[in-house]
Amino acid sequence: MRMRKLKHLTVTRLVIGGVLLLAAAVAVPAAWAEDDKDRQIRELRQRLERLEHMIGAKAGALPTPAAAPAPGALAGAAEAPQSISDRVRSIEETIKTVPLLSTMKDWNFGGHVAVSYNYNFRDPKSQNNGLRLFDDKANQFDINQAELYVEKPTTEASPIGFGVDVLFGRDAKKIHSLGLGIDSGDDPTKTEPFDLTQAYVTYKVPIGKGLDLKGGKFVTLHGAEVIRRTGNFNISRSMAFAYAIPFTHTGVMATYPVTDWLSTTLGIVNGWDNTDDNNRGKSFHGSATVTPPFLKDFTLTLGGTWGAEQVSNAFDPTRDINRNGPKRGLIDLVATYKPIAPLTLTLNYDYGRQEEAFVDNGQTAIWHAVAAYAVYDVTDRLSVGVRGEYFRDQDGFRLPGATPGSKLEVWETTLTGRYKLFDHLFASIEYRHDEARDNKLVFDRGDGTKNANSQNTIQGELIYQF
């Protein structure tokens, strides 16, 4: 009894300590915070100077169209300093005269670096956080993501575009598609920390409001969370993201805005996370997004996939590796609503089924996942959020540690605070509790055994976005 009280006391102290650390992070930079308008002006000046530097010109010294001197003006008189608008016009004129810069003027460049520290209160000897994807290693500092991307969107004036997204770090090892970075049979613990997450070409067909075609490798349409760390509020990923849906697809896709409030996408792809198809069949992949005009700040997306996804000879080397099956299906629903400006509510539901999940002509496995999110912007720098989710692996097919053919149900609650320390630099702290129902023992204890039905973690993260 005394040991349990000590453990509860330790947990309480650590949580309080984490909150105090976040409070300190808020208090110190806040003292240096600039007026928002002055900050925006300073950022614009810095961006302008970088652009001038990129095209090889000294700031404020770019040539401008010649103007006739005013009557009576002295020859050789000192010129007045250029205004920001003059400097921008000068850059635009210079870009038009350089072929490479003219080609790149519509390109978007960006990226980020994310590092973190994760602590598991059970202090498992294995250093494993059960049922986690990117933050699966406990009690250590980690380099999670270093991402670089370049993209050119399509427009009516410039209908051809492309996108390339390269990811480095621990997270990259978990999202390799079959045939690109990891092959069937490879040891996943030895995969390289590099992933070509996206590489695609786009074309806007001049039909109606514009039909956008995309071909190559691209991230999935499904789920409320994404691979890119800057696209999520929480540090850890939900089980729905990790185990209910695919990460990427390779194939072709078409998107068309039917009306101002309805957009549809439909594609044919190799499958789930497959650059090399693992069977003879292809999968359909699509979604429809609704933004009803009668309900402001509400978005509903319904998507799904259907096709042959199972590795053809995964369980029986004598089976027909060229057959078109068995089939896997997924229905994905994401609803987002902002009832008031600072508050964002999100609901995500996934239903999946896999035919012949374990053996030929065997049972069909089914899984459900539901996750709810609430994020509130306390100030323009500080935000807090909560996530709750439930995952039901009805037949032990999707969750790690599940017994094939046996049901495993897990729920989790996550509390997160994020603060903008400086321009482009964000700090987050998160507490998360995971628990398996029916006392299923799927989490590791400190003695190295897997005989716990719950775990608690706390972690911090720094992200620099550029």
Image (cartoon, grey):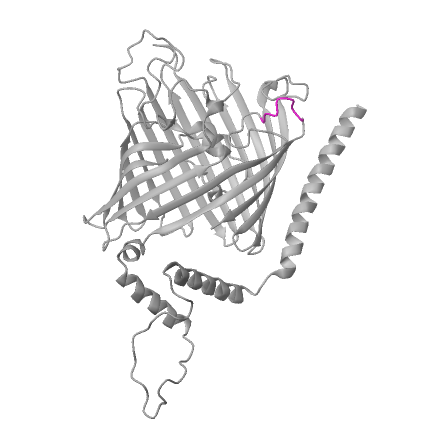
What percent of the width, then of the height, locates residue 243? 46, 27
Q: Is residue 440 left or right of residue 391?
A: right
Please say whether residue 271 is one of the residues in the magenta stretch.
Answer: no
One can see residue 222 in this view: no
Where residue 167 sits, quadrant-wise, is: top left
Where residue 218 sits, quadrant-wise, is: top left
- Highlighted range, magenta: 123-129
Q: How many marks?
A: 0
What percent of the width, then of the height, locates residue 11? 71, 33
Which of 162/71 is in front?
71
Q: Residue at x 64, y 33 (%)?
A: 119
What percent of the width, then of the height, locates residue 428? 59, 44
User: Outermost residue, left direction?
Assistant: 207
One can see residue 256 in this view: yes
Q: Residue at x 53, y 22 (%)?
A: 409
What percent of the width, then of the height, locates residue 405? 47, 13
